[in-house]
Amino acid sequence: MEILDIYDKYRKRTGKTYPRHEQIPDGGLRLIVHILIFNDKGELLIQQRAESKKMGGLWDLTCGGACQAGEDSFEGARRELREELGIDFDFTSIRPILTANFDQGFDDFFLLRENININDLKLQKEEVKDARFASRAEVLDLLSKGKFVKYKKSYLDLLFDLNDDRKFMEY
């Protein structure tokens, strides 16, 4: 059973925890991570969720999940990537490209540019059915056909835009 830390609105651990598959206590927040891997062609590595999972059979971002108790987002991202796709990457040398706040917590997005051979992936069968690289147009087509996790189109566009130009602001 996965145990998750409960955070306050300032992103500080409260010292309390709860089991992942239970509702988070009122006022509590959780920490989520997503990893986006783009190749040199600008294609995003996407995964198809295992049929037994919530939203089973749908395509999704490279990987992601909840940080377990005691993990920061760097450790959670490393664990999730290793568990789901068999890739080991030390995230402490980079920062999240984006943090999205949502009703139940914080979601750190890490962006990597790696030309990964799909055949080298070690898919966690309980979580991942398949994986492949897809262009922006392919991802948006899957979304329009109801075959991709229901993110907003503008949000997916933003993720691709962040890959296209990491220096979106200069001072």
Image (cartoon, rainbow, N blue to C red):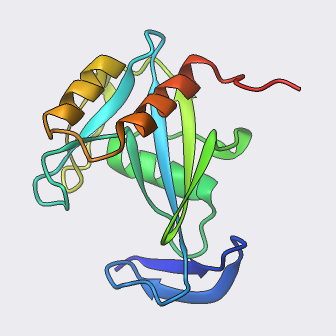
Q: Residue 151 location in percent, x, y?
A: 34, 45
Dividing the picture into quarters, in which one does residue 153 lie? top left
Kindly tell me whether residue 98 is visible in this rendering.
yes
What is the quadrant of the N terminus in the image?
Answer: bottom left
Q: Residue 6 location in percent, x, y?
A: 57, 81
Q: Residue at x 45, y 17 (%)?
A: 39
Q: Is residue 161 above or below residue 73?
A: above
Q: Residue 114 location in percent, x, y?
A: 50, 22
Q: Residue 14 location in percent, x, y?
A: 67, 86
Horizontal arrangement in the rendering, residue 27 relative to residue 37 (left or right): right
Horizontal arrangement in the rendering, residue 49 relative to residue 137 (left or right): left
Q: Residue at x 28, y 27 (%)?
A: 139
Horizontal arrangement in the rendering, residue 37 relative to residue 144 (left or right): right
What is the quadrant of the C terminus in the image?
Answer: top right
Q: Is residue 141 above or below residue 54?
A: above
Marker count (numbered): 0
Q: Is residue 163 above or below residue 42?
A: below
Kindly tell me whether residue 119 is visible in this rendering.
no
- In depth, the one of 10 and 89 nearer the eye is 10
Q: Residue at x 25, y 21 (%)?
A: 138
Dividing the picture into quarters, in which one does residue 9 lie? bottom right
